[in-house]
Amino acid sequence: EVQLVESGGGLVQPGGSLRLSCAASGFTFDDYAMSWVRQAPGKGLEWVSAIKWNGGITYYAESMKGRFTISRDNAKNILYLEMNSLKPEDTALYYCATSEFSSWGQGTQVTVSS
């Protein structure tokens, strides 16, 4: 079965950095584009970033550009999201998913607070 497991979340101060990981299994990872999506407390889902199957093309929501970097290691079946210059408004549960959103992980919590 398809399995996506996020990790790397935690509590950081504003301006800090964090690297999230998503371990994938149960499907041919390098056949799929992948995405990160987040949900802040009391808010709806917000698309964060996406990456094509070979990592050659990436996409970001406007508020993430210049701060977040999506990447993947197809040999290890892992998706990454490197987050820099974190802001309190980045506080959310972060999910990885296939880019058509047919499969989701359980999410990892990121809290940005002083």
Image: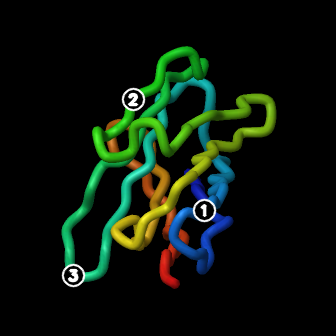
Residue identified by numbered label 1: 6
Type of amino acid under label 1: Glu
Q: CA separation, marks 2 and 1?
A: 20 Å
Q: Position of residue 82 (x, y in %)?
A: 61, 48
Rendered view: 18 above or below 36 = below
Within-10-Å neighbours for mark 2: few <14, some 14–19, many 20+: some
Q: Position of residue 101 (x, y in %)?
A: 34, 46
Determine whether, in the image, residue 41 is placed left or right of residue 57: left
Q: CA distance from mark 3 to mark 2?
A: 25 Å
Give the residue number, with chain letter if any, for mark 3: 42
Question: N-terminal of the two: label 2 or label 1?
Answer: 1
Q: Spatial distance from mark 3 to mark 1, Cα to Cα?
A: 21 Å
Residue indicated by mark 2:
59
Q: Nearer the viewer, mark 3 or mark 1?
A: 3
Q: Are marks 3 and 2 in contact (CB under 8 Å)?
A: no
Give whichever of 109, 34 is nearer the camera: 109
User: Which residue is depicted at the point 46% across and 37% down?
Assistant: 66
